[in-house]
Image (cartoon, helix red, strand yellow):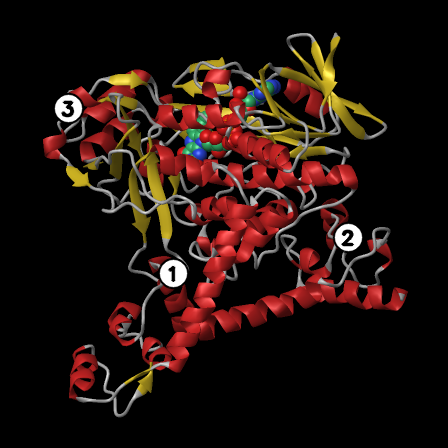
Amino acid sequence: MIQYANNYDVIVVGAGHAGIEAAFASARMGAKTLLLTIYIETIAQMSCNPAIGGLAKGCLVKDIDALGGEMAKCIDATGIQFRILNRKKGPAVRSSRAQADKKLYRQYMTNKLLSEPNLDVKQAVVTDILVKDGAVIGVECDTGYIFKCRSLVLTTGTFLNGLIHIGDKRYPAGRANEFPSIHLAESLKRLGFEVQRLKTGTPARLHADTINFNLLEEQKGDNPPEPFSFETEAITLPQVSCFIAYTNEHTHQIIRDNMHRSPLYSGVIQGIGPRYCPSIEDKVKKFPDKNRHQIFLEPEGLDTKEIYANGFSSSLPIDVQIAMYRSLVGLEKVEFIRPAYAIEYDFVQPYELFHTLETKKIKGLFFAGQINGTTGYEEAAAQGIIAGINAVLSIDNKQFVLGRDESFIGVMIDDLVMKGVDEPYRMFHSRSEYRLLLREDNAEYRLLDKGYSLGIIPRSRYDRFIHEKTLLEDCLGVLSNIKVPYNSKTKDKFATLGVNIEGSIPLIDLLKRPEVEISDLLEFFPNNYPDRILNQAEISVKYEGYIKKQKEEAGRLQKIEGVKIPDNIDYSKIVGLRREYVEKLNKFNPKTLGQALRIKGMTPAAVSLIHVYIKGLK
Ligand code: FAD
């Protein structure tokens, strides 16, 4: 083995969605960073759907952007259809989603990484983690090189012992036709990590010229498209449509007739799959009363004929796949470019991690992304930025943790670390207790100053944000101070909206009414405010009561969150604390009473016993 001449502060293994954000965060914080990945051409590969964002995931992307990450800017530069989901529902569940041109997405990220100061990018397969005195010191690669570092972030996705299934055909791979990571998986087991198996799947990619789009429902994007990043002024790529097809009774019969040939149902696949992204055979089995399922046909880019069949993932043999795809109206003559497949892979139970994503076993070793049992690009990227930040901070014994009331990232990491996973974890709005605080529109208000303090957000962006904050305060002041005059014109105007006014009335009081929007009030005050400020002002006013209530609840949680559990506590000494709780507490090693309460199966009564015991120690 040859030791590479340069020593690095941080090494990141894997240039998928987690690894990229980890590497950017680390390099932008000024740490000398190395990114190692199996194949340069597949940096930022979208292994499955060609889309970023979606319900709750959109908020993760905005939060990554507000901390100084790259995902939002990349999708803005390479997106070919943008939609706001739940637009008519409240702001707490409004979510951005965009289709990407996959090739452009990869190119954007690759070029950005290769031109980032403080960052080296190299193609190599990492085969071993080097540890000395309980702390990571570097990695060994298949090229014969050893790279030394002070912190290491592993983001190996589905590659650890990856095994692809198409019917009864099986072969080891990290992703279709890419090497799996075998030696690294062994290295993790040798280091004592609890490794388990999960499974995921992807649909076939179809040739656009063999689809009769005239028979399908067209789904257009929003016009104008709204960018993800608070920094992007406009979307510039041409925008395209998606199409909706439907399975039918015939499709379901083909699947039922061949269920015994699915490795999922014949017992060959042992790993548990994503409940919320099921394969078509799963859907047919679990929902026998449904006579059709929606399939979204999504272009994979502007200059490719490949169409992604969203909702149609499968591990059935290829002859069955073709028969079932061709049973759909509009797809009678469809040809595959790539078949659907399922993949099983190793992951490490995330309760082996601290909230910083550092492993409890080895100092300086961090895990992020699918290796922690999550699924999705956004979940991976969100963990990546946190692991990258903490990999740098840990060198000086510092840390950065987001609370459940600060970001969906905080919710996700807390769930992972305190509960572990028994199926692939994806983000949902319902996972958060404080949905009204964690909105897409206020991501910068929640996180930008943190990104700036960490040195990831540049001064110019921070100054722009401070200016916006001042504008918002000014706008709220104007809404409080200016009144709508009372006359026949204003009386009639608001009567048509369903609001009776009986005297002049402050704008803010009218805006609190559900029937009135800020656009109805613009004529009554000097409006020099950008739309973003008006939107922010409207949400703050309309939801003031609910937001206040959630902030108070978050404050109450902070109180028990603030009660620290001593490192050397012996839970077996707590009188009345059942043995099963003692075992759980030893396994999850909570740092505060709040964390203890969130361990799966823990009761408030058990946590009170710990509280009383801690008080008695003082
Ligand atoms: P990845 O994006 O997988 O990146 C891993 C990186 O690590 C790669 O760059 C690889 O080259 C590198 N690497 C691995 N081992 C080594 C090594 N030893 N040395 C150096 N580099 C290494 N998500 C959904 O939300 N919904 C879905 O339906 C869905 N279906 C999927 C279906 C399939 C078949 C696959 C493969 C993935 C699917 N995903 C799905 C998951 C989604 O692709 C991942 O969640 C996301 O890409 C994970 O990001 P990551 O950064 O953790 O890993």
Who comes first in sequence, dot 3 or dot 2?
3
Q: Is mark 3 within 8 Å of ligand 1?
A: no
Question: Disc 3 marks which residue?
Answer: 332
* Other residues around mark 3 within 10 Å, as few (<14) / some (14–19) / many (≥20): some
Name the residue located 56 percent from the left edge and 47 percent from the top edge.
Answer: 459
Q: Residue, x 75% and y 26% (percent of image)?
A: 191
Task: Name the residue at 42% across, 56% down.
Answer: 441
Q: Which residue is mark 1?
A: 91
Contact check, label 1 and label 2, Cβ < 8 Å? no
Type of residue at label 1? Answer: Pro
Q: In the rendered image, is residue 350 in sight?
A: yes
User: Can the viewer see residue 47?
Assistant: no
Ligand 1 is within 8 Å of the C-beta of the residue at disc 1: no
- Quarter assignment of residue 50: top left
Residue 38's spot in the image, x, y percent? Answer: 55, 16
Q: Which residue is mark 2?
A: 582
Mark sitting on residue 120: none
**Distance in Å between CA atoms under marks 1 and 3:** 41 Å
In 3D space, how far apart are the residues under numbered discs 3 and 2 (Cα atoms)? 60 Å
Q: Earlier in the sequence, mark 1 or mark 2?
A: 1
Query: Label 3 amino acid?
Result: Glu
Q: Amino acid at mark 2?
A: Val
Residue 372 left/right relative to 148: left
On-image quarter of the C terminus: bottom right
The local secondary structure at tag 1 comes to loop
* Closer to the camera in the image, 611 or 114: 114
Position of residue 484 in the picture relative to residue 4 (left or right): left
Quadrant where the N terminus sits is top right
> Looking at the picture, how far across and down is residue 615, in whole percent?
84, 68
Return the residue found at the far left: 214
Q: Which residue is outermost to the bottom?
A: 502
